[in-house]
Amino acid sequence: MEALVSKYKHLKGLPIQSFEKIHPLLLIGADQPHLITPIEPVNLGPPGGPAAIKTRLGWTLQGPVKLLLNPLHPQQVLFTSLSPKHTELMRNVTKLWELDILPYRNEKQVTRSREDQAALEILNKGTVRVDVNGIQRYATPLLRKSSMACLNASEEAVMPLLRRTERHLLKDPERAATYSAEIKKLLEEGYVAKLDPDKPPQSLERWFIPHHMVMHNDKNRLVFNCSFQYKGMNLNESLLPGPVLGPSLLGVLIRFREHSVAVSGDVKGMFHQVRLLEQDRPILRFLWRDMERDREPDIYEWQVLPFGTTCSPCCASYALHKHVLDNTESSDDLQFTIQRSFYVDNCLQSLNTAYEARGLIDRLRKLLASGGFNIRQWASNQPGVVSHLPKEAQSASTELWLSQRETEVPESTLGLHWHCPTDTLRYKHRPLEYGLPTMRNLYRVLASQYDPLGFILPYTTRAKILVQKLWAKPREWDDPLFPDELLQSWLQWEAELKSLSSITFPRCYVTPEMDNDSVRREIHVFCDASERAYGAVSYLRTENSQGKVQLAFLIARSRVAPKKQLSVPRLELCAALCGAQLAEMLRKELTLEYHRITLWSDSTTVLNWLQSESCRFKVFVGTRVAEIQETTNPQDWRYVDSALNPADDLTKGKSLEDLATPNRWSNGPPFLLMHSDHWPKSPAASCLKDDSELRKSTFCALNVVTSKAEIPDASQFTTYRELLEATARCVHGVANEEPLTAGDFLQAEILQWRASQLDSFFDDFQCLKQGKPLPSNSKLLTLSPELDEEMDVIRVGGRLRRAEALDIATKHPIVLDPSHALTKLIIQDYDHQLKHPGPERVLAEVRRKFWILRGREAIRNHQFRCTDCRRWRASPKIPQMSDLPVARLQLFKPAFYSTGMDCFGPFSVKIGRRVEKRWGIIWKCLTTRCIYLDILASIDSDSFLMAFRRFAARRGTPFELWSDQGTNFKGGERELHEAFKSMSPELQLQLAKQKVHFRFNPPGAPHFGGAWEREIRSVKSALYASVGAQSVTEEVLRTVLTEVEGILNSKPLGYLSSDVSDIDPVTPNHLLMGRLDGSLPQVVYPQSEMISRKRWRHSQILTDLFWSAFIKYYLPNLQTRSKWQKDVEDIAIGNVVMLVDPQLPRAMWLIGKVTNVMPSSDGHIRTAEVLIKGRTYTRPVSRMIVLPAIPDDTDTS
């Protein structure tokens, strides 16, 4: 750097650092211009030297530096690369024969890419509604890439292409007239606009799109080439395609066949109904001069989404979906239609009745029209569904059917022909004309056979196998030299294509009388493979209550076997995988309710593999078995003989003539029409020990016999494993440094079993050893014990000797004493290995090897002491129900003297056009059961205080308030105290006697407030019965709450007698109103007695009568305890407890130590403080589970 400064004086004084022997870590590209552009004037210096530039990252030098000792001499090199023709095309075709390309998957199950997420974010932020001729249409932004450069092209960029198009049109005047008419139509419809040449440009961007005309399906169509390249720039490459919105084509077709009434429609010019944002229009321009070649062309600009841009399908679908979702409720069936029955602009849906279909069409047309989408081309297999529509809304085939009784005009539905009068699906056949058969022409013919449901797969698979044979020898795409045998096979196959249009199959899976919810539906998937191909086919079996069965073809998929030869079992496994994926796809796409899915295979080897662990097999088989087991239940797989398997037609092939007649491929296998008892039976499972696909494993065992030695005492060990290891070390020899073997551990177990039995059953052991009968008082008498001569231990004789399915250890388990230390360790070991299940599971596993006397009792005793078992299964011990608190017995006090309160809700109320939330608050007199209901605008202290003031003004200020520990209540208490302190001393003295006492229940203890919690349930029930889930105005909600309050205050407090001679039961209204409810007339007094002593005495008498009836008829009913009658041991300080939290899984419940207890008036502990990780929580005892004592170093603090 010093040499540079000495040579170039303009660098002197600049803070430019010098670096040597370093490697760059990050290169800053031109896509970050704000980092490398100058922020000050450039210091150029003399010509031929470096320029000093200050950027946001500091000073830098740019330009030549003539300081090199050995100057570099530039050299020119010519590099030539030759790319073979059709290389990319050949590579794509080869992929067709690869094995692991999965069949159709549901696109919605795939996680969206970052580009798709960016596209959705652009649409969410930029989509707006604009008024176009009185219709509120949608305008979406183009999905520009973040790295998109400024597109700029002049008219001269596309002028050569316009001149070439004009030259072609001059040769065909009729086509030229059609061309001009199409552009004039775009202009009249407002889809494009002609720009004023004199108007100055409003944007720095502009891009021109060339256009031409093509013939498609016998129609001339105008095409705009948005992939036009100019100076390395391309419009479509600068745009994101966006995600696929809506269902898959295959899913739409599957659901289109579900019900007996079907409808189809099409959105007219869907792309052209969505407007462009003004800033995006300049890059969608084109030139046209109406064949007037002697003048400059006019500039047209697109106003709507054109056909040809890569993001148009996504933008149009987004606008359509957004309109429906924004203008319907989530439960509206129109949302199902748009999300599950629309494929781009085509609507295909099936319904149960013509009435439902007609209503759907009317509502969908009205809804879409409000967003500028005109859905037309309506067709149905029931004429009455579309007969009321105007002719312009009906499809051409429907109009001919209704007006001229023309029944042979089919309706196009996503590439298939739908014949509405017969309600069948057919195939289109358009003959392709070509010269000699070549690989290119063969693929053209194959690609033209559109078969989304796979009904003609037995026919097309023959051609795919033929093409694979042709690829066995490398050949050019246009090479006409085919082997004679293969050429004749191809010509024969192609000749059969003429009868493709004769292939028909029912659109609906069942006849109308079977289209109801009372039938039983089953899905059956058949799999098969050969050395040439493999695949799967599925059928829907429908059976009504009378036993009538109908079968329907669902969908099929097949693949040609890979060129690398595989064994037949492996190909059969690939077919099973194809069937499993087919079943998974049907499970996600079908909306019909079905009872089960059954999968069939004629390979017993594959069925055996599916019943085994996938890890036992080699990689090829293991990975596929694992995937099949993930998506299907191995118990759902059954065996079918090859002669009965319809999937066999996939691998052997069929002609179109055979497929046109009823057969097992189209109608399903005949045995499915019979009862399941007559279906094929699965053969007995065979052993896999000789299977070549099994992983090879080697096992080695060593049996060591040692002399009898002193063995460790089981009572001195805490785990069974530690005991066995110590015993095995004694057997092996303490001085022996060799590692312990399996034989050592087996011998250790036998020694411990024998020692245990000698401790517990010594007399029985001696009798069996000497061959004598057991004494009559023996504990083992009912077990018919036997002595195992080999191990010298007592086993159960029992009655299961002839159970051949059981092994010896299960038929004759080893007898153990439940009180012995070894037995306790064994139970502990089994409990730990099984992850602490219930006692029955542990007992079942133990009895496979051991017979423990009173086994259930022994296991329950262990699990009661086991901390983990207690943690997973124990429940809290709730203390005896306490005596009634003083607040419940405030007799001869005014109503609401002791009050409980709580909030409930929220409820949705309408405020103008918006919807807001409101909450209810309940105030209940704890003695008289009077209630008062009010509305809270929000859950905060301010709203609570306002409600409290209203309550006190109407019912009087309570002496004490009881509530849970809600933040609004605690905040209200704090503000009441602060307001009380700020009052003048005189006013404080007057209000001192009226100060409200707040009492709070422990957190998480709703039963502490059961007196008002039960009333909340009654309030909610009454509200839902009258209002339901709808949003009402706040006035309506307040009125309903007031009426509910009146109803609840009129509930009898005591027993309601059926005897008319008995007095009426007392109700809260008797105290509040002096009568049963508001419907009874009041006592009328003359004007002169309005403030008389008589009226005052009357009110006093009513109050006395209330309290007399209250004490006499109601209060005695509170004597009994309806639950929690038993005394339980109280929680004590130092107990380790687990806090029950219904909001969390049991594994996440916290464990802590009790640090303080709060005795009730009767001495029982119902609330305690628990220390957990340094924090103290106050909780009710009913939310605590006492765990066995743990060491002090356990982390509870």
Image: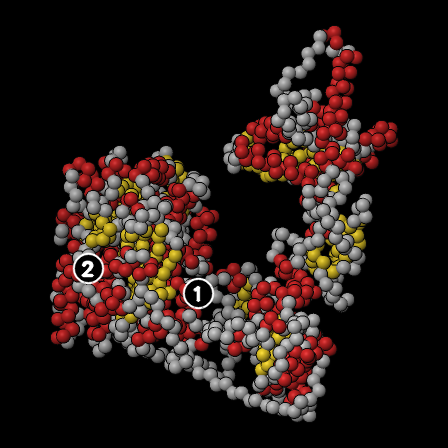
Q: Is residue 484 visible?
A: yes
Quadrant where the N terminus sits is bottom right
Is 733 left, or right, of 420 in this rendering? Answer: right
- Mark 2, other Cα within 10 Å: few <14 / some 14–19 / many ≥20: many
Q: Is residue 197 left or right of residue 1128?
A: left
Image point (77%, 12%), residue name: 1094
Task: Give the crowd class for mark 1: few <14, some 14-19, many >=20 residues within 10 Å.
Answer: few
Q: Could you say where residue 474 lies in the image, as x and y percent from the top left?
A: 23, 77
Residue at 13 percent across and 51 percent down: it is 172
- For residue 842, above or below residue 401: below
**Kind of residue indicated by mark 1:** Glu
Residue 1184 sits above or below residue 54 on the image = above
Reading the image, the residue beneath label 1 is 630
Snapshot quadrant of residue 392: top left
* Circle on res. 59: none
Q: Report if residue 826 is visible in the image.
A: no
Which image quarter: residue 685? bottom left
* Mark-to-mark CA distance, 1 and 2: 35 Å
The amino acid at mark 2 is Leu
| Residue 270 percent across, percent down from the top left | 32, 45
Residue placed most toward the observer, 74 or 926: 926
- Where disc 2 sits, the SS reads helix
In percent of the image, x 53 and y 70: which residue is there?
A: 26
> What SS does tag 1 mark?
helix
Left or right of 653, for residue 100: right
Residue at figure coordinates x 17%, y 48% from the top left: 176
> Where is the C terminus found, in terms of image quarters?
bottom right
What residue did someone put label 2 on? Answer: 659
